[in-house]
Image: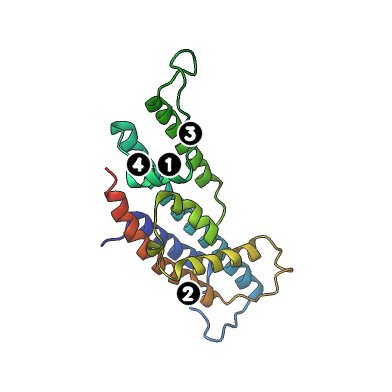
Amino acid sequence: MATSKRWKDLRREIATLRRHFLPDPFEPLGVYAKSNRVQSHTRAFLVLSHAEIESYLEEWAREIARACEAVWTSSGKVTKPLAFLLATLSERIEVPITLVGPRGQDSPQRLVNASVRLFQKFYKQIKDNNGIRERNVLGLFAPLGVPATALGSTLLPNLDNLGALRGTHAHQSAKAVQTVLDPETEYKRVISLIGELVVLDEWLVKYRHRIR
């Protein structure tokens, strides 16, 4: 199964960040001239790589939601992702007691109106997402019906670790952070994550293809 263009773009962006921020070649002993600069650049690599992965995940969630919204709008078909959205995020639709006046809407129209609010709510949830920790990833994909098997056994813990590491270096000054980063180790960490994302990416490609 081929990976998506989105995943290939992510891999390309990480390669660009590597060229811009990390030493070439890496030193086997991890000792670099201008070590303060290397540390600053490695922190920048981590923070920006995190941002690229976060954007990748959010864009996938948004695409799946938009696809099932388009099918619903055009044909009224409830696709599998929409069924999960309705089950997890939708408001309860009240049974009408009258069809007269401004609140006189029958059940089908109430469902249409509720679905509009549902998608608005989920798109806001994506927009407000801030991270790649386990809770962030589940918040993006669980409402769409993405199963645990699509995430693999190590992806969530490793995303969580990168999210925690990014938080440490993004929210504290360089003087406050005690950890010395090895640029090669951090590069391998990110590259390994990009590789793990292939399983999710291929699953999402097939999932998206079935929404019609």
Residue 129: x and y in percent read 54, 50
Q: Measuring 62% from the left and 79% from the top, which residue is drawn there?
A: 33
Question: For residue 117, which numbered disc appears in the image?
Answer: 3
Element type at mark 4: helix
- Amino acid type at circle 4 is Cys
Q: Which residue is mark 1?
A: 86
Compared with residue 32, is residue 54 higher up or lower down, i.e. above or below?
Answer: above
Identify residue type, mark 2: Lys
Q: CA distance from mark 3 to mark 1?
A: 11 Å
Q: Gap between marks 3 and 2, in whole Å?
A: 42 Å
Disc number for residue 207:
none
Residue 132 visible in the shown view:
no
Q: Where is mark 4, residue-wise?
A: 68
- Dot in front, 3 or 1: 1
Report, in whole angstroms, how far the alpha carbon at label 1 lies from the one at label 4. 12 Å
User: Does label 3 or label 1 sit earlier along the sequence?
Assistant: 1
Task: Name the element at disc 2.
Answer: helix
Q: Amino acid at mark 3?
A: Arg
Labelled pair 3, 1 in contact (Cβ < 8 Å): no
Indicate which disc, 3 or 4, sits on the residue closer to the N terminus.
4
Q: Residue at x 63, y 62 (%)?
A: 167
Q: Is residue 23 above or below residue 169?
A: below
Say which residue label 2 marks: 188
Location of residue 70 in the rendering, given as x and y in whole percent from the top left corner: 34, 36
Crowd class of label 1 (few under 14; some 14 to 19; many from 20; radius 10 Å): some
